[in-house]
Amino acid sequence: MTPDPSSSLRLGRIAATLGVSDIQRASAVYQAVFGFEKVFENGNPTGFMILQKDDAELHLSLQKTYKPPAFNQAHMLVSNADAAYKACEAHGLRIIRRLEDKDYGLRAFVFADPDGNRIDVGQIV
């Protein structure tokens, strides 16, 4: 039997890329709600941007006619789901699934950003 080459692989960072119709608006929302900071941008006008906070990294890609899928596109672990939920509400983000304790050990909710990208947010409990 041939050994599976993936068994020797160590995976590193993987970052979600979200399509957005207005990259400056999207960046402002993620910075205001979650405290992300812009660490890279490319293009003039900007067509790609990397936001980062702590161990989290989010890539934004400008797509002028962007239409989001109807499923969650990223999952973000946070230290305080209640605070994240309140921040999403305070900034007028649409809540898809309300904050609740899940039977799989997370306190979680789902929100949609201004482009309709669905992000699942959870805190390990």
Image (cartoon, rainbow, N blue to C red):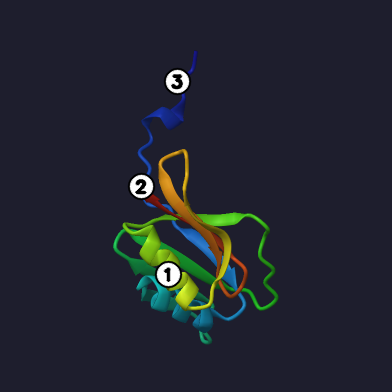
Numbered disc in front, either 2 or 1: 1
The quarter of the picture where the C terminus appears is: top left
**Which residue has dot 3 on it?**
3
**Which residue has dot 2 on it?**
124
Q: Secondary structure at mark 2?
A: strand
Numbered disc in front, either 3 or 1: 1
Q: What is the C-alpha distance between the residues marked 3 and 2?
A: 35 Å
Front residue of 73 and 98? 98
Front residue of 78 and 23? 78
Q: Is residue 109 above or below residue 32?
A: above
Q: Is residue 22 left or right of residue 104?
A: right
* Disc 3 packing (10 Å; few <14; some 14–19; many ≥20): few
Q: Amino acid at mark 2?
A: Ile
Earlier sequence position, callout 3 versus callout 1: 3
Q: Is residue 103 above or below residue 59?
A: above
Q: Are marks 2 and 1 in contact (CB under 8 Å)?
A: no
Residue 29 x %, y % = 47, 78
Q: What is the C-alpha distance between the residues marked 2 and 1?
A: 17 Å
Q: Secondary structure at mark 1?
A: helix
- Is residue 22 among what the camera can see? yes
Q: Amino acid at mark 1?
A: Lys
Residue 99 x %, y % = 48, 57
